[in-house]
Amino acid sequence: MTVLLHFTKRFFLACTLLFSANSYALTCSLDIDNDGNLDALTDGLLLMRHLFNSTGDALTENAVSANAQRSSAGDISAFLESPECQDFFDIDGDQQRDALTDGLMTMRYLFGFSGPALIQGAISSNATRTTETEITGLLDAKKTSFMDEGNNSGTALVVRVLPAVSEIANGDILTVSIVGSNFTTNTDGGSFELSWDDSVVNFTGITIADSLWDNSFDTRANTNPNPLNISVGNSAATGIGGDFEIATITFKVVGQPGEATSFLMVDAVGGWAQNGLLPVNKINVIYDTANIRVVTAPGSN
């Protein structure tokens, strides 16, 4: 479902790809073009092309963001060929880097893949990391390292589902909160989608943090609102910054013990926009994945 919302005369969420410019000084990082953002269609694509031995324009064409601090083919090749990056991008631990294993899993991860879909057909026969848990843990650690190094303010802009990990019994009600963190640049609002596995949890309701957002929209009225599109906006002149609440969502657990699901978020049309006059200054955020697992209820046989 495509949604375009005009929250205020200053804030129109449109599908414009503009990225915030941040400078990083990492030895090696998932942020290959060094624009302060992690993106499958820039960083992931550059890694894949490099591992397929592309050089020059064939390496960088349409794969470097407008705000990249590392943009030439020579600089990107030198970065990826550095000794630190040789080990950094050996994702499955087989002592070599390969486009169809390490590159593919990195790109899938940056697209938001998780579980079996992250690793299917992408583990080498000599891998020492072979499970989705090991691969996800490694890539999560690399993303966390990127976030901890920070942008101009020292931290990345993050939207996350809390709690990050839950164990809950069939029939119980699960309540999760969606929050924003480290928004040092005040924002007019944002638009994103949340998805999950309906065989494990069923959506029952959502409450937007109306004290912060005076314009909001979600697709709860749909017969099956999965993915759930959530858009929030604030008309105040200063916008909203720092750490803030976005929404609280409830689900009924319908899965059986041992089943699990992830809550995944991606930008919807427009993404997050910085406070200010038109044209919209889009800001890029990192979405953190949350996971739940169904367990046997206490006292059950």
Image (cartoon, rainbow, N blue to C red):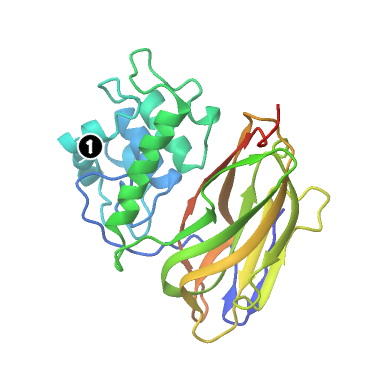
In the image, 275 versus 177, the foreground residue is: 177
Q: Secondary structure at mark 1?
A: helix
Coordinates of residue 202 in the picture (x, y in percent): 74, 45
Above or below residue 202? Residue 105 is above
Horizontal and vertical percent for residue 56? 27, 39
Identify the residue at image location x=44%, y=24%.
131
Res 11 quadrant in image: bottom right
**Residue 39 left/right relative to 4:** left
* Quarter location, residue 76: top left
Q: In the image, 146: left or right of 164?
A: left
Please say if 212 is above or below 292: below
Considering only vertical position in the picture, is 264 above or below 24?
Answer: above
Decide which of 157, 246 is in the foreground and name it.
246
Q: Is residue 246 left or right of residue 123?
A: right
Which residue extends farthest front?
299
* Circle 1 residue: 85
Residue 220: quadrant of the picture: bottom right
Which residue is found at the position 54% from the left and 52% from the top? 163
Q: Residue at x 29, y 26 (%)?
A: 97
Residue 136 makes an appearance in the image: yes
Residue 145, image x, y percentages: 30, 49
- Residue 268 placed where, x, y %? 61, 56
Kind of residue sitting beneath label 1: Cys
